Structures are given as C-alpha cells and as structure tokens.
Image (cartoon, rainbow, N blue to C red):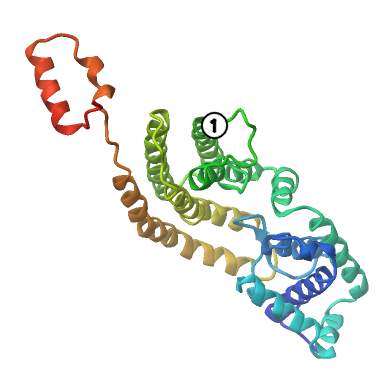
Amino acid sequence: MTFGPRETDLLLSDWIAAEAIFHLKNTSYWTKPDWVSNTKIHKIIYNVVEKNELPVTTSWYMHGAFVHDYNSLGLNFEKFVSHCIGLKRGPIRYRSRVREILENFDDVYVDIIYFSDIINSYSSNDYLDYLYHYEVPDKYAPSYLAKHAIFGDRGNLTSLMNYLTIGLLEDLEDTEDPLDIINGIYNDISDFNSTVYKLYQDKLIERNARIFFDSLEECLNKLEYLLKRGSVLSTGSGSIINIFKNNFIWGVWRPYACYITRDTVTGPWEETVKKRRVVSWRSDALSDYLKNKSQMDLFLSTLNLHMNYEDYKFILRDDGPLSASILKLLKTYTRRSD
C-alpha cells in the first residue's frame, strides 16, 4: 500500500508516541508526579525521527523539540494517554501499516524504548535544565535559557510567587529573601531582552515585550516598596505573578518561538508550517497581550500604596510656606502614622 506524506507523517508520530507511552506505563517513571510530560513525549519522537531520518515534520518551538503534525498531543494528558493506549491495543493492522513504511521497524522500536528511558530518567525540571543547556541548537540556547531563568518552575518569578502565596522560599537558600529574588528578576529580564533581540528584530513584538516588562517591573517596584516597609502582603498577590507568567509565555515568548520554528522546521510539511507560523503568530501575540493586559492593570491599580506620613516628613526642612503647603498635602493624602 502507498501512503501519502501527511498520512505517513501522522502514522509514524502516532505510533512512536503510542509505543513510548505503553512502555512508560510499565515503568517506575509513571508513578512519579509530573514525571512524564508532553514536552518529553515530543522529544522522544523528535530523537527517534532524527536518528532514523523518518519523514515526520519537527522543529524547535515553545518548550523545546516539537512534532508539528502529531495532533494528539493537543489533547489534555489523560486523553492523550488513553488515545495512545487505544492505538497500541488496537487492530494488528495499525502496526502492520507502520511495518510497510519502515524497513528497519525493529531498530526504530529499540530506539523508542532507549530514548523513552533516557529522557524519563530526569525529573521534568531537571530535564528542561539539561535540554536547554545541551540539546537546543547553539544559536537558540541562550534564549531558551533566559526564558527558563525567568519563568521556569525553578526561576525567580516562580520563587516570588511561592513566597507571596504561601510565605515560603522554596528551593532557595535560607539567606535569600524576596528582595534578592526581585533583584534577580530585573537581571533576568535584561538577559532575556539582550538574547532575543540579537536573534530577531521585529518592532511589533519588541513593543509588546517592552510594554509587558514595563508592567511587570511596575508590579515588582510596588512589591519591593511594600516589602521594604515590612507590609504584610495578601496571598492573592501571588496570583498576579501567575498571570504574568502566562502572558509572557503566550504574548512575548511565543512570537520568538515561532521565528525559531520557521528557522528549524524540517520534514514533509516544512513549507506549510512556515506559512502557518507567519500568518498566526503576529495577531495572536497582540490579541493575547491586549486581552490579558487588563488583568495586569487591574492588579496594579488595586495594589494601592498607602503612604505613611513618616515616609515623607524628611522633606520638611524648615517652617517656611513651602513646607507648610507640603505638610497640608501630606495630612490630606497620606495616612498619619500617629
């Protein structure tokens, strides 16, 4: 039987994922929380495809290696697993169709098991650290690392969110405090901007990124001020950090990731993917940003700074008319500490 490029692409990526999931279901990796992830499954397929030069369309994208025509990975993970198990337990004809495509079927199967075990020997966080340091193409590695430093699960922004939400600095040394984390975020933002701007110059996404980071820094400035005053912050303050994380991933990082995809995509649907990314990412980036910026603005407007009289009294240097006027304003618009 002759298979067309698209049917071959989908059939092979489906089969590799099904074999990997079925294998991992019978290992200790499966019992560990969040150990097996979509990102890892994409990388298993990617590695098998690359080693065996299979006709499957792949590239680097949002979180790492990406399989473009494997639509099942768009399902939530539970449905995705059920889908793969169904394929594995389905008619023998499914596997026989793959054998018709692959002359080296048994060798490819061995590679699926090999890469499944290697990739899932890391926890999800450790795997991303390894992936971005050692497997992302050198040209793009600094951008992935900079993105991960700010918004990864072990990044400074997540640490700040944990502190604001539960009052704990998880995964941090005892000597560190929230103000150190905030300073770290400022440095991370600078590193991210410098790395992605070196790769791509696009005025629209640069503008959106600048507005986004201005909003984030405004939030950090207010939090920094309140922390220095010893104010008790509500646990709801942590939720805004999660909003910033989501806005960053879809409104700032995704446009750059689409550029990376267009530069790295290979396979039967290479030209289709390039055209699709050109059409979609610009409007998506802008609409995502505008849709969610109102949430950030709302938070910033409600994070009111109730200034103490003590914060300003140092400017009253004499008893002249100017000091008297300032004193009157302070009494009207600040809360007196006494």
Q: Quadrant of the N terminus?
A: bottom right
Left or right: 156 as drawn, with respect to 42: left
**Relative to residue 335, is residue 44 depicted above or below?**
below
Q: Quadrant of residue 40?
A: bottom right
Which of the two residues, 44 or 275, is positioned nearer the viewer here? 44
Classed neighbour count for the residue bearing mark 1: other residues with Cα under 10 Å, few (<14), some (14–19), many (≥20) = some
Q: Which percent across, then down, holds residue 123?
A: 74, 53
For the C terminus, the image quarter is top left
Instruction: Name the secondary structure under disc 1.
Output: loop
Residue at the (49%, 57%) spot, across then down: 250
Q: Residue at x 64, y 68 (%)?
A: 68
**Is residue 68 among what the camera can see?**
yes
Residue at 37% from the left image edge and 36% from the top image edge: 222
Residue on which the image places disc 1 = 177
**Residue 101 drawn above or below residue 213:** below
Can residue 66 be spotted in the picture? no
Give above or below for 72 relative to 50: below
Of the pair 226 and 157, the residue shown nearer to us: 226
Query: Which amino acid does the dot numbered 1 rest on?
Result: Asp
